[in-house]
Structure formats: structure tokens, C-alpha cells
Image: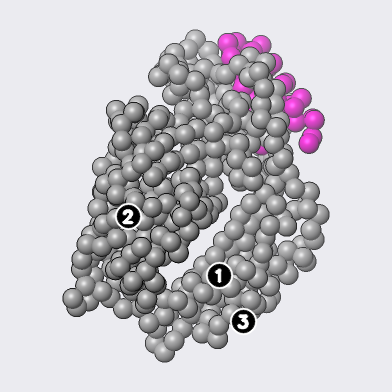
Amino acid sequence: MDSQYKKYAENAVHKALRSGASMAEAYISSSKELEIEVREQAVDTMKLAEDRGMGIRVFQDGKNGFAFTTDLSDGAIDEAVRQALANARLSEPDEYRLLPRPAPSYPEMDLYDTAIRAATVEEKIDMARTMEKEARAADKRISIIESSTYHDGEAEVILVNSHGISLQYGVAYCGMYITLVAGQGEESQTGFAMKYGLRYADLDPAALGREAASRAVRMLGARPVASRQAPVVLEPYVATGFLGVLAPALSAEAVQKGRSLFAGKVGQQVASDQINIIDDGTLPGGIASAPFDGEGVPMSRTVLVQGGLLQGFLHNVYTAARDGVLSTGNGTRGSFKGTPEVGTTNFFIEPGSQTPEQIIGDIKSGLYVTEVMGLHTANPISGDFSLGASGLWIENGQLAYPVRGLAIAGNIMEMLGRVDAVGSDLQFFGTRGAPTIRVSRMSISGGGQA
């Protein structure tokens, strides 16, 4: 960790106060990312990106301004402070724009696996090659590997404010993903697999290659089915997609702006009693875990929905001040180039006790959804959706045959209310995760014959 960065941040805060700011904050991040893509066992692209800079927030007469710089020299920091103060003069006063004070303690976290940096580029290339090779070897019908990619990154974050906060941490993450096509005759189907985490040793390229191959191959020969109402099982990736639609609605900012389908529903039943939704910035191994958020508030575990009852919302310092509550540590910051927004950290549906096989085993006739199309078209305010879907038909408790050309429609609140089983197989896809989920009844539109 470069202790010089802390001096730059402290220097910026002092300069802002000397220039007339009543409060000031400096946020520095320095990051590196490596991406290696292999095609036909050869390196197709290799990208190394670095980004470093400081964001400065100043507060004066109830107004606030922001500016950033990628140059940490004295003159550049002076200029950024001047610019932030000029921006503050142009803004509207807002009594809720505040800076937090130091917390009594911050969570202790192990976020930096030295093995990620210690592994050579050649070893990382070999991992991407292994993933591609295993996918091809898994089934002769794998016709195209679109991308076999290794990805890692590391960052250090420093935050200093005029209330006495002076914090820093380092983090590293790594991951792999593969997308491919299986072909049979004129037909082709796609498959993918991905895994991201904080531990280099947890990556298993061979298993990911085989998983992507099996996802593509199992869809070959897919056919339409007749329209009906039936139980629907969402595999973890699809359930995580639906959870992503809910994420903005669980932010206090959306509620305060009248853009949340959960507004006014705290303490009410918003899902079946099987559903618990958690945001946990302290989750061991979570790639969004950190000791503090983008404002210096300790990260925490926030239960948003418990037993189907809405418990509350995610807050940063601003939304918390407006509601007269405490920040939940969800002042997220994409980089030094922006101010803290309200965002999720490690955001997931808590696993239940049943295996996916048990969940499917209870169904006489239903749909196991492996892919939905158009999830971005779901209305985040009303919760209405109509999506293309494909997957596997369930008959007598078994996955029977692949199906495609379907549509599933409904309302996300009604769908959550009909969840009657939650799996034990929680899987994360980046910072969001879900287990297998069963919905007792949904409308399925198909093009097949009854």
C-alpha cells in the first residue's frame, strides 16, 4: 500500500478547508486489470489497464461540489480543489449532504490473495487454454468457442475526510468465463460458464469448460410446447437475473424519488415466506466485500426481506439523513471519477434447504428455465415482465427434453409471492447470487401443440 497516497488525500482536504470549504473529502483509488482471451489455444487478446486518481468533494454554505484529477501533483490537486469549490457555488443548498464521522470500528477482512499477483501471465494463459480444451473435449458437438477468458484485478482505496476519517484497504479478485456453441445438423445452441472470487486457488478452468459444454449440448433438439399454466423452476443464473431487476427498487434513493415498487411497503409481505434477500458487504469471499463503503461508513450485512416481509432499504449517508436513519454502508463508488451513489454490494437470495433435484422431483409437469431473453425490458416500477425463455421440460420429477420459443409473463411481486421452494445451491455471478427457485405457477406461452 502506497502511504504517499494517504498524504496526497490529507493534503487535498487541508487545501479545501484553507480555501473556504466547511467540510471536505478526498477519495483515491488505484487499480490494475488484466484480461487474457484465448482462441484455438492461442492468445487472441491481452489487455492490461491501469487507472489512478483522486475525487474531491467539498461543502460550503450547505452546497457541495465535486471534481477529480488523474494527476496527483500539487498543482493539479490545487486546481481540482478550486474546481470543486466553483462547482459547489453553482449547486443548490441541501441540508442532507453530509460527511460521516469515524466509526468505532471497521470489519477486519482478508481481501488480498497474493497468489493472484504471484501467478505468471503464462500460467494465467494456460488456465484459459485448459478451459477451452476441456470444453472441446467434453463433447464432439462443441463447434465454436466464442471466448475463453481469464480476468483479474487489484485495487487500493484511500479515503480521508475533514471529520477525521482516514482509511485504506487493498483488494484483489480473479475470474474466468467461457461462451461457446454446440451444433447438430442445422441447429446450434449456446452455453456459458463463469466464476469470480477472491482466491486464485478456487478457479477450476477444466470444470468451467465442461459446464459450458454441457449447458449448450443439453439444449440441442429443443422444441416448442403448448401454452399453459405450470410450475416453473428458475436455475440460479436466471433467478439472479430477476434479483437484478429488484436491486434498484430496494435502494432508498429509488423510494425517495417515487421509483420503487416497494415504496410504503416496509413491514408488509412482498414475497413468499421462503424468500430472504440480503445485501452483505462483509461476506467472506464476496467480490464486493470491503471494510468500508465509498464514504467511509463500515460495510454491513443488511437483511432487506426476511420470511417474505420487507425490512427496509439500502442507504448511503444522504438518503439516511433524509429519512432520519443511519447509512447501511451502501454508498457505492464505481471509481474516483464519481460521487457515492446508493448501490448493492454482495446481493443475494439466501439459500434454503432443498437440493435442486428435490425441487424438480416434486413436479409432475413444468418448466426448468435456463435462459431468459429481454430481462432489461422488465418494468422496475410496476414489476411487470414478458420474456422469451428456453430450458428443459420437467415430466414426473425428471428433466425430460429441451424446449425453446417460449415466453413467460407476469409480475415480479406476484412471482415472488408464489415461490414455494428455495434451493441450497446458492451461486454468485459476480456480485449477485441466487439458488434454484421454484414458482408454484406461471403463465407459459408456447408455439407447440397441446
- Amino acid carrying label 1: it is Glu
Q: Which residues are magenta?
A: 1-29
Nearer to the camera, 48 or 240: 240
Measured from the top left, where is residue 210 in percent x and y?
58, 73
Q: CA distance from mark 1 to mark 3?
A: 12 Å
Quadrant assignment for the N terminus: top right
- Amino acid carrying label 2: it is Val
Mark 1: secondary structure = helix
Q: In the picture provided, is 55 more to the left or to the right than 441? A: right
Q: Is residue 298 visible?
A: yes
Dot 3 corresponds to which residue? 137
Between tags 3 and 2, which lies in front?
Answer: 2
Coloration of the structure image: one colour
Q: Are marks 3 and 2 in contact (CB under 8 Å)?
A: no
Residue at x 73%, y 63% (from the top left corner): 124
66 w.r.t. 435: above or below: above
Measured from the top left, where is residue 45 in percent x and y?
65, 67
151 w.r.t. 41: above or below: above
Measured from the top left, where is residue 5 in percent x and y?
75, 31
Residue 44 on the magenta span: no
Nearer to the camera, 5 or 358: 358
- Amino acid carrying label 3: it is Ala
**Residue 174: which quarter of the image?**
bottom right
Residue at x 70%, y 22% (from the top left corner): 166
Dot 2 corresponds to which residue? 439
Residue 8 on the magenta span: yes
Q: In the picture provided, is 351 more to the left or to the right than 262? A: right
Q: Is residue 44 visible?
A: no
Dot 1 corresponds to which residue? 211
